Amino acid sequence: MNATGNRAAVDADELRRRVRALLDAHPPATTDRLDFLRARFDAGLAWVHYPAGLGGLDAPRSLQAVVDAELEAAGAPDNDPRRIGIGLGMAAPTILGFGTDEQRQRLLRPLWTGEEVWCQLFSEPGAGSDLAALATRAVRDGDDWVVDGQKVWTSSAHLARWAILIARTDPDQPKHRGISYFVCDMTDPGVEVRPLRQITGEAEFNEVFLTGVRIPDSRRLGGIGEGWRVAQTTLMNERVAIGGGRVPREGGMIGLVADTWRRRPELRTHDLHQRLLRLWVESEAARLAGERLRQQLADGRPGPEGSAMKLAFARLNQQISALEVELLGEEGLLYDDWTMRRPELVDFTGREAGYRYLRAKGNSIEGGTSEVLLNIIAERVLGLPPEPRTDKDLPWKDLPR
């Protein structure tokens, strides 16, 4: 920051100069991938809008595209963002917003380089859509918290070193006020990860059982009992990460179907043509809305619009994948491999049409169910009256279960 409290003057030309210096000192062709990523982080070119010393330069977020373009042109390695999406899109903004200096220094660099994978311990068997009703307990014991409970639908838990975790620390408080937020070491005793096999045959999700897990109080994010407020930052960024990713025109699911349509004229019918045109237009509208959302984020104005983007993402993926299966006819019923696997990343457009159709069914559940997102949009975007919530002020221990 400069003397007037404004961001330091880092413009596109200055970023290009810094990228050239990085490339000169660490030529991608002869530098180990991890060494290059660490050097990029230390040069402030990881996420330029983050503070200096934490992988950034206090620059406008919109200038990240300048850095990425220069490095891509030079053949530099990236940090495989699809593999570490939970860390990048959910954990990092929360750590930046609520972590101590020590937590930021310890956690952000290996998170960004991909050395340490993150997962999210939020949902529970009895607290999915109503996340604030969670029952996992954290009881204070000296300088530690002892955590017991079960989490579910945990992507990447089988790969993760760290987890962002919310647990109930005061059952006498109403459900939203008795929660605290922690960073959990997934290698600690008492953490058990079990695969959840899905309709695709894969097990990208997991159940996580926590039995007497000791978490030092130094790994708490935010104040005791303020976990719901901290979690809102995570959830807001999660929905943007899922539904607001940058895609080119005719990218993603709609591009695959459009390509099949052009290559396979024998599959075409008038009805399918009309449906394809409608979904193409809706996909382009969603893409442009995503660009506007990213501009808001660049200006430091994140909001509930991310919920609308995630809702549109789920609906479009399901409708487009269904159209693709119908377009392909008997071919659309084929499925290449039901082998039980625990993948390192999720590719929504990977494999064949049958996989895309089945995997898209989860899009309206993960990252907030479509029903919950409709409520958020109605209340926070449209300003409609909220639904009656009779349990809002009741102590959690008195809630019917």
Image: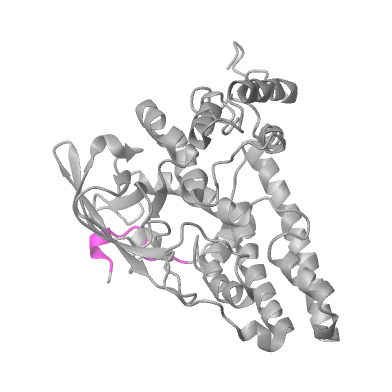
The number of discs equals 0
Q: Position of residue 241 (x, y in %)?
A: 57, 51
**Magenta stretch secondary structure, dominant:** loop
Q: Is residue 91 visible?
A: yes
Quadrant for the N terminus in the image = top right
Residue occupying the point 30% across, 49% down: 186
On screen, residue 86 above or below 332: above
Tell me the magenta residue range: 388-399
Q: Quadrant of residue 65?
A: top right
Farthest front residue in view? 30
Residue occupying the point 64% across, 52% down: 245
Give the camera-side residue of 230 and 321: 321
Left or right of 119? Residue 260 is: right
Left or right of 6? Residue 323 is: right
Give the camera-side residue of 94 and 399: 94
Q: Position of residue 306 (x, y in %)?
A: 60, 53
Q: Position of residue 357 (x, y in %)?
A: 60, 76
Q: Quadrant of residue 327?
A: bottom right
- Scheme by which the image is coloured: one colour
Residue occupying the point 51% across, 44% down: 88
* Residue 398 magenta-highlighted: yes
Q: Is residue 152 visible?
A: no
Q: Position of residue 116 (x, y in %)?
A: 40, 42
Give the camera-side residue of 389 and 284: 284
* Residue 180 magenta-highlighted: no
Farthest left residue in view? 142
Left or right of 304? Residue 338 is: left
Farthest bottom residue in view? 330
Quadrant for the C terminus in the image = bottom left
